[in-house]
Image (tube, rainbow, N blue to C red):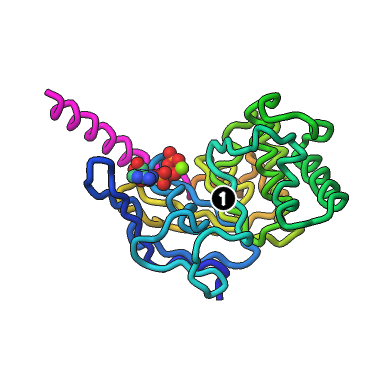
């Protein structure tokens, strides 16, 4: 049995104007234990919506999500979440304080939790920055502390919503490598959202491409069976997978741009 099962899941949002918006419809996906699954799609297609439902932050409208065969009943410690554009660090705590916060809440003794927090801060390249507070850190550093904080809680699953989007290219490449290493070493199951096809190919066991919204679901899944050596942007086999994914997503980008243009035109007409 797959660790995570999404069965014909739909999500309807009620807009502030009172009308319904079907963000996701009949979305089905199984993620195996230990699998690194990347979800790719155009802006606004419903990626964050899917992740929020798996995290337990948003209830499904219809369908079901099961983890280990059990319906999810809200957020839980088995799923660590890194949010999109996250700025949820505690301003009154240092970097170290933020990373060890979850462990402190669980009653882990001080020496052990400080050791772990140091370890994960070092892993995300922030050794020596333990004492700094969020206001003294750059956006990219804050994002890395968030990742360290989630890893320090050692959840079974990582749910990551474009976690590296704010990082410079070098740090991003380092973090991709580290994340991949940590996830295979600790056999974590990962649902990772990205816009970046390259990033998805470097990281994923499988890549799921979503349709443009509304009422989006998976358009297709590409299995990435590349060796580590082949996960180089210039490798022929890498380019082969790139072409496959790009072809799948290209039409959705055009559809999404077209719909946005229609929406702008319609709202202009309504305004006149
Ligand atoms: N709380 C909400 N209330 C109403 N509509 C929402 C809400 N959250 C998201 N939506 C709508 O649902 C659709 C999907 O949004 P979502 O945030 O899941 O997209 P996304 O694929 O993560 O986009 P991006 O790549 O830009 O982050 C969008 O049209 C959005 O406007
Ligand atoms: Mg999003």
Residue 237 placement (x, y as % from top left):
61, 49
**Element carrying mark 1:** strand
**Numbered circles on residues, count:** 1
Q: Is residue 263 magenta?
A: yes
User: Residue 174 falls in which quadrant of the image?
Assistant: top right
Crowd rating for badge 1 (residues with CA inside 10 Å; few <14, some 14–19, many 20+): many
**Residue depicted at x 62% and y 67%:** 33
> Which contiguous range is marked in magenta?
244-272
| Percent position of residue 52, x then y | 48, 52
Q: At which x and y percent is residue 121? A: 78, 40
**Going 64% across and 28% down the picture, which residue do you hit?**
168
The quadrant the C terminus occupies is top left
When the figure is inspected, residue 71 is found, relative to residue 115, above or below; the finding is: below
184 on left or right of 167: right
The residue pinned by badge 1 equals 192
Q: Is residue 232 visible?
A: yes
Point 67% across, 30% down: residue: 134
Q: Residue 144 at x, y = what percent?
A: 68, 38
65 versus 14 height, above or below: below
């Amino acid at each position: 049995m797959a660790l995570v099962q999404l069965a014909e899941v739909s999500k309807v949002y009620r807009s502030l104007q009172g009308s319904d918006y079907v963000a996701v419809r009949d979305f089905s996906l199984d993620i195996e234990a230990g699998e690194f699954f990347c979800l790719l799609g155009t802006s606004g297609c419903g990626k964050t919506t899917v992740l929020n439902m798996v995290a337990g932050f948003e209830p499904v409208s219809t369908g079901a999500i099961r983890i280990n065969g059990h319906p999810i009943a809200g957020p839980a410690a088995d799923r660590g979440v890194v949010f999109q554009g996250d700025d949820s660090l505690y301003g009154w705590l240092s970097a170290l304080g933020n990373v060890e916060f979850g462990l402190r809440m669980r009653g882990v003794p001080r020496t052990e939790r400080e050791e772990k927090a140091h370890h994960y801060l070092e892993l995300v390249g922030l050794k020596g920055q333990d004492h700094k507070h969020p206001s003294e850190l750059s956006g990219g550093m804050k994002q890395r502390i968030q990742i360290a904080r989630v890893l320090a809680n050692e959840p079974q699953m990582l749910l990551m919503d474009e976690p590296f989007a704010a990082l410079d290219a070098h740090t991003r490449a380092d973090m991709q490598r580290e994340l991949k290493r940590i996830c295979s070493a600790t056999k974590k199951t990962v649902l990772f959202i990205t816009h970046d096809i390259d990033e998805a190919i470097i990281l994923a066991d499988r890549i799921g491409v979503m349709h443009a919204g509304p009422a989006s679901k998976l358009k297709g899944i590409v299995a990435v069976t590349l060796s580590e050596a082949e996960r180089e942007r210039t490798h022929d086999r890498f380019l082969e997978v790139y072409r496959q994914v790009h072809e799948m997503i290209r039409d959705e980008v055009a559809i999404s741009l077209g719909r946005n243009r229609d929406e702008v035109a319609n709202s202009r007409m309504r305004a006149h």
